[in-house]
Image (spheres, rainbow, N blue to C red):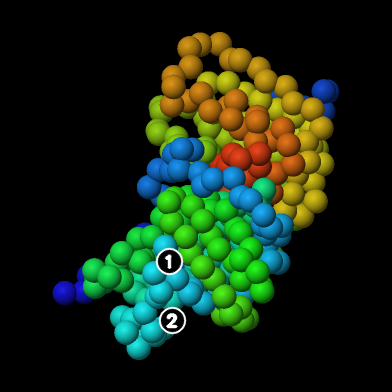
C-alpha cells in the first residue's frame, strides 16, 4: 500500500518542482545591521581525478540518468511515476527521481564536488528494485559527490560508494532562484558542520554573521572572526583570528576550528527560499538557517 506523501511542516517550495524545489571587527560577533540524516566527514567521496565540473554552468539543466552503480535504469513506462529517471540542476536547487519518489534540495559546487543540503522528499512505497536505485541516488547526493566528466558532454556523480551516470542534457523545468548577492547585515543559525548536526544546548549560541567586510562565528564555545571580500556566491578571506572563550568546550560544541578552516580559503555559498544557507570550501561545508525572516520575505 502506498504511503502518503510527507512534506515539511512549514510551506516549502523545494517539494516536487523545487525538490525538484581590526577596529572594524564588531564586538560580540554582531552583524553591523540588525537584521537532514547526519553526514560524517568519512562519507566524503574520493578526490576527483581527470576533468571535473568547475561551475554550476557545467551541470545546469535536466539530465537523463543512464545508469546507477553500473545498472541501467528502467524505461519510463516501468517506473511508478511513468517518468524517466533524471536529475535537474537550477541554482541553487537540485532535484529529480529514480522512478518513484521526488528527491532534492540545494547545492553548491566547490573543488569539483557538489555539496548538498537535502530538503524534504515524497515518501511513497516503491517496488524493491526501484527502492534500491532510489537509495543509491539519495546516498550519492548526500555524500557531496565528485563530478567527473565521461566525455561527449556527459558526467558521472560519484560519492557514498555509488555512481550516477548522466547524459542527454535538456532545459530544466526547475526555476532558478537569484543568489543573495550581499551577506552584509545577515545572521545565520548554525545547524551542521561537516555533516555533524549541532545538538541543542541551553544558552549556547551557534551563529555565523556578516557585517561589511567582516564575518564572525561562534559555536557555543569559541569564536572566530576575519576580514573578507565578496562577489556573488563567493567569499575570499583576508586574515583570520581565532579566540578561545572562557570555559571548557564540549565535544559537540568544538567546531569553530573547522569553520575557521572553511573560511580561511575561498568558499562558495548558496541560499534557499526558506532561509537555508549552504557554504563549502577546502573540503569542508556548513549548513545554517536565516536568523530572522528569509531574504525577500
Going by the image, does 24 lie left or right of 190? right
Evaluate whether residue 91 shows in this view: no
What is the CA distance from the residue labelled 2 to the residue labelled 1?
17 Å
| Residue carrying label 2 | 84
Numbered mark located on residue 184 in the image: none
Say which quadrant the C terminus sits in: bottom right
Going by the image, does 76 lie left or right of 126? right
- Between circles 2 and 1, the one closer to the viewer is 1
Residue in the image at 72% along x and 53% along y: 233
In this view, the residue in front, 34 or 158, is 158
Percent position (x, y) of residue 147?
60, 58
Percent position (x, y) of residue 179?
69, 60
Residue 93 vs 167, above or below: the answer is: above
Residue 62 in which image quadrant: bottom right
Going by the image, does 20 lie left or right of 229? left
| Residue carrying label 1 | 70
Q: Residue extending furthest left?
A: 1
Percent position (x, y) of residue 111?
67, 48
Query: Would you call the spot at circle 1 few (<14 residues within 10 Å), some (14-19), or many (20 or more)?
Result: few
Residue 21 vs 285, above or below: the answer is: below
Residue in the image at 66% along x and 74% along y: 152
Marks 2 and 1, the one that precedes in the sequence: 1
SS for callout 1: loop
Percent position (x, y) of residue 284?
59, 39
Question: CB atoms at circles 2 and 1 under 8 Å apart?
Answer: no
Amino acid at each position: 500500500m502506498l504511503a502518503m506523501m510527507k512534506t515539511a511542516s512549514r510551506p516549502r517550495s523545494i517539494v516536487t518542482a523545487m525538490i525538484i524545489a581590526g577596529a572594524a571587527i564588531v564586538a560580540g560577533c554582531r552583524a553591523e545591521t540588525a537584521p537532514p540524516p547526519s553526514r560524517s566527514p568519512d562519507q566524503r567521496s574520493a578526490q576527483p581525478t581527470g576533468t571535473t565540473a568547475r561551475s554550476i554552468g557545467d551541470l545546469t539543466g535536466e539530465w537523463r540518468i543512464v545508469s546507477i552503480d553500473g545498472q541501467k535504469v528502467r524505461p519510463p513506462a516501468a517506473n511508478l511515476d511513468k517518468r524517466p529517471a533524471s536529475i535537474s540542476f537550477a541554482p541553487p536547487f537540485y532535484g529529480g527521481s529514480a522512478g518513484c519518489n521526488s528527491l532534492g534540495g540545494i547545492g553548491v559546487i566547490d573543488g569539483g564536488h557538489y555539496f548538498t543540503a537535502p530538503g524534504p522528499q515524497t515518501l511513497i512505497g516503491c517496488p524493491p528494485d526501484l527502492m534500491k536505485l532510489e537509495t543509491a541516488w539519495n546516498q550519492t547526493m548526500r555524500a557531496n559527490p565528485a563530478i567527473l566528466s565521461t566525455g561527449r558532454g556527459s558526467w558521472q556523480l560519484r560519492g557514498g560508494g555509488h555512481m550516477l551516470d548522466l547524459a542527454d542534457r535538456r532545459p530544466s523545468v526547475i526555476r532558478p532562484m537569484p543568489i543573495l548577492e550581499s551577506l552584509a547585515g545577515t545572521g545565520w543559525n548554525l545547524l551542521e558542520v561537516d555533516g555533524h548536526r549541532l545538538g541543542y544546548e541551553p544558552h549556547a549560541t551557534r551563529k555565523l554573521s556578516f557585517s561589511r567586510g567582516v564575518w564572525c562565528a561562534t559555536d557555543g564555545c569559541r569564536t572566530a572572526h576575519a576580514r573578507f571580500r565578496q562577489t556573488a556566491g563567493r567569499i575570499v578571506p583576508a586574515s583570520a583570528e581565532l579566540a578561545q572563550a572562557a570555559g571548557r568546550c564540549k565535544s559537540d560544541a568544538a567546531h569553530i576550528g573547522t569553520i575557521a578552516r572553511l573560511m580561511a580559503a575561498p568558499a562558495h555559498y548558496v541560499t534557499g527560499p526558506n532561509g537555508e544557507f549552504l557554504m563549502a570550501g577546502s573540503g569542508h561545508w556548513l549548513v545554517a538557517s536565516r536568523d530572522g525572516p528569509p531574504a525577500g520575505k
